[in-house]
Image: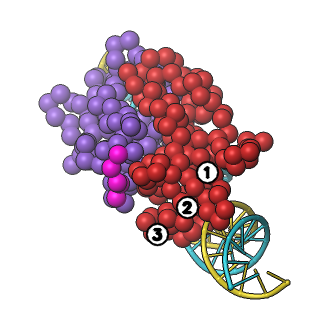
Chain colours: A purple, B red, C yellow, D cyan
DNA sequence: CGATTACATCGACACACGTCAATATCTACT
DNA sequence: AGTAGATATTGACGTGTGTCGATGTAATCG
């Protein structure tokens, strides 16, 4: 089961791959399987609403953002925002933690670094 | 006209944006328009075949690859490969140059750097 | 000129994806 | 318990996208 809810209550990433697929694109050959895995990660970034959400979460002063504060800024319905947050979470780009009534989202920096490394020389 | 064919015969990028939208995601706020532009760029990377093509072109010893050598490795039909190369080109990630019978593709490093910077801290 | 090869474009199809209204689930509070 | 608020899930709908066969276009060669 990927979305573990441990003692901390943090729902985290499926942890599919880390440095597995992620050699720099311009360095080493990329087989079909690795390219599929990588494409999944970039798909999560390939939507304007998700980029806005990621931006809102990442620029939050405390490092995390309440889901309740993410609906209005992006101008989409609550289910749509919830859907996009799920995509970001399953891509390992963000983490979510339920505290009481609210769910707090924070970015997973290592994941962004992985993708950054893929694009490096 | 975006795809200029100048004296060099190089078909290059639509040049939509460069450092326009591209402040680090975790630094500055991202408006709707910028997020749409950025999403377009990531969409080009969000496909396994395109990642393989980009990889094949980038890892070519001379820095450029003939389209004729890209069909067999990815295991797709010639029209499909041609389509994906077009997407990469219109995203500004690769350049193409027709020399005689063949078309040669090369990566546009600055474009990858732009995306890399967006993901930086 | 006619034939051949390389690449792009077109048309069609199946499937994936973004979106929302309605509903379910869970928590807090009275 | 009952109500209210926050979030997730479901179901449906329209649009976008990857794929291929067929065809078009351009360049080379005999």
C-beta proximity under 8 Å, tags 3 and 1: no
- Which residue is under mark 1? B96
Specify whether residue A30 is painted magenta.
Answer: yes
Task: Pinpoint residue A39: horizontal percent, then vertical percent.
Answer: 42, 49
Q: Is residue B63 left or right of residue A103?
A: right
- Same-chain status of marks 3 and 1: yes
Q: Quadrant of the C terminus of chain B?
A: top left
To which residue does mark 2 refer? Answer: B67
Q: Chain of mark 1?
A: B
Compute the Cα span from label 1 to label 2: 9 Å
- Please report whichever mark, 1 or 2, sits nearer to the chain's N-terminal start: 2
Task: Specify which label sits upstream in the sequence, 3 or 1.
Answer: 3
- On the image, the x and y values in percent for residue A20 come to 25, 47
Q: Could you say which is closer to the camera, residue A53 or residue B22? A: B22
> Is residue B99 something one can see in this rendering?
yes
- The chain that hosts pointer 3 is B
Residue tagged 3:
B72
Task: Identify the magenta region.
Answer: A27-31
Q: Which mark is residue B36?
A: none
In x, y percent, where is residue C30?
Answer: 35, 13
Q: Are marks 1 and 2 in contact (CB under 8 Å)?
A: yes
Q: Is residue A118 left or right of residue A20?
A: right
């Amino acid at each position: 089961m990927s979305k573990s809810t441990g003692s901390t209550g943090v729902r985290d990433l499926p942890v599919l791959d880390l440095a597995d697929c992620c050699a720099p694109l311009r360095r080493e050959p990329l087989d079909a399987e690795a390219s599929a895995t990588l494409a999944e990660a970039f798909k999560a970034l390939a939507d304007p609403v998700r980029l806005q959400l990621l931006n809102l979460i990442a620029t939050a002063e405390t490092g995390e953002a309440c889901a309740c504060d993410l609906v209005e800024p992006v101008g989409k319905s609550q289910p749509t925002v919830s859907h996009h947050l799920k995509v970001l979470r399953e891509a390992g780009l963000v983490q979510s933690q339920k505290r009481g009534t609210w769910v707090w989202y924070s970015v997973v920096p290592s994941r962004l670094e992985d993708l950054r490394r893929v694009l490096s020389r």
